[in-house]
Amino acid sequence: MGDLKGAILARMGDEAGGIDKDAPEAVALLYPSPYRVGMSSLGYQTIYRAINATEGRTAHRAFLPDDVDAWRQSRLPLVTYEKLRPVSDYPVIAVSVAYETELAGLIQALELAGIPPLAEDRSEQHPFILAGGPLTFSHPLPLAPFVDAMIMGEADQSVHTALGVIFGSDSKDSAMRTLASQPHVFVPTAHGDILPPIDKADTTTLPAFSQIITPHTELRNMFLIEPERGCHRGCTYCVMRRSTNDGMRIVEKDRILSLIPDDAKKVGLVGAATTDHPQITEVVNALVDSGREVGLSSLRADRLNDDLVAALRRGGHRILTTASDGASQRMRDVIQRKTTEEQLRQAAKLARRHGMKRLKLYIMVGIPSETDDDIDELIEFGKELSSLIPLSLGVAPFVAKRNTPLDGTPFAGMPLVESRLRRLRRGVQGRVDIRATSARWAWVEYVLAQGGRAEGLAVLDAVHAGGRFSDWKRAFNALPESRPRRLLVRPSDRLGRAS
């Protein structure tokens, strides 16, 4: 027991920028994945700072333990980092959910806290569970059975209103009734399956940036800041496309630079379209000139040029990472990914010219209408690029998301995805490094992305059965045919020999 709490104290001792605050209105800010993932979330850190900046209110962090079984066996309740206080003691638990399979982590975290995961099993004495996060941009209905309310979209400002309602109400029921009248808050007991529109934060609240820097994350000791929010592009598979929240909002260079602490030696510029920022090269050069390492997310091949790649190399980049997404030019056209073969070829040449060690491309397989010919085109193009610079392909099965033009598209199926991967590996003959995400877990993500409350309840069954893929498959296959859903195939119809 002491070792588990000792690990928390050790992490806290390595942090810079933590907030240790007492206040009458205390919130447990829960991330349903381990610390290293949660503290890499810019949205999570932004909400942490925003709540703590409110007079009379504080937020204390909690995470899914690294080793859930060890924590369970210790019989120690899940506690917050700042106070080592049981999560169940807080009147409000605000949880940030990034993607569908984190539902399992939420269930585990609530049970470790001694809180029934289903809202219908909780009483007035249990904390109010308020959810938000990236999942609300797409399709949070599978989350509905587990929460009392959720904020849709950007919660930079609306979190304050929601918490004000909850703390100002004399009961959980009255809080939910009041929240149900708010324009961007979804209350499952009041709204059924009708989701309100997502919220859009005022530009004056931008940008989001790190509060805490820590070595114990995916992005070690890196200060994160967004140079822009949203995206002006129209890729048909992407939740963050231009129609989601009115496109891209730019943060001026001087404001970006003014918010970066003097002692931040590594800076990550993160967002859906960072290289579309009109001043991105100047921002990178200014950071590098000040002696910092710089990382960028979402490099777009059509925005790469000598000046930007040179700046990235000076900032410590050794691998140039961009995305093709479609396996062929035809597939890129199908999904409206405005990236050409020549632009990708030029990216490889730029990477080589500026001394990068490797080019990495992200690819999706299993997109509607894809054929073996598209994979063969990728094979030949991959071999060509690998003659210019060592090449890695990060391959992921396509998963259709709600709130996108490809919503409702069937999952290609595990046998087909795996056969395409075999064809790709055989074709490149070891000349290209291929790293593929699991077709099985992509299918699980797909079922949840296209499902609803029933699929969310099935997650509870899968977790209680042990959380193996076979447990998820069994739980989904047990769902009644008559349930409300938009899945175009039952899970078992596409499993085939891969089960």
Image (spheres, helix red, strand yellow):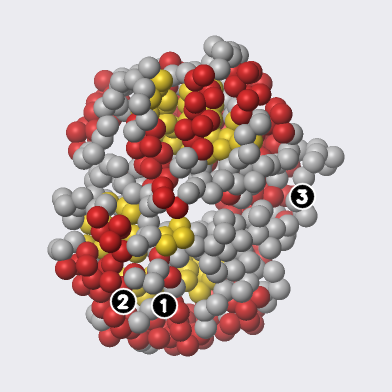
**Badge 1 amino acid:** Arg
Give the foreground label among 2 and 3.
2
Residue 155 percent coordinates (x, y): 50, 41
Considering depth in this image, is 96 or 348 the residue closer to the camera? Answer: 96
**Badge 2 amino acid:** Leu
Sooner in the amino-acid sequence: mark 2 or mark 3: 2
Residue 11 percent coordinates (x, y): 25, 35
Q: Which residue is mark 1?
A: 303
Label 2: few (<14), some (14–19) or many (≥20) C-alpha neighbours in 10 Å: some
Identify the secondary structure beneath mark 1. Answer: helix
Quadrant of the snapshot with the N terminus: top left
Identify the secondary structure beneath mark 3. Answer: loop
Circles 1 and 2: CB distance less than 8 Å?
A: yes
Residue 410 percent coordinates (x, y): 72, 59
Sooner in the amino-acid sequence: mark 3 or mark 1: 1
Disc 1 from disc 2: Cα separation: 8 Å
Q: Which residue is mark 3?
A: 486
Q: Residue at x 59, y 18 (%)?
A: 172
Circles 3 and 1: CB distance less than 8 Å?
A: no
Which dot marks residue 308? 2
Residue 67 visible within the image:
no
Identify the secondary structure beneath mark 2. Answer: helix
| Relative vertical location of residue 26 with respect to residue 240 in this rendering, above or below | above
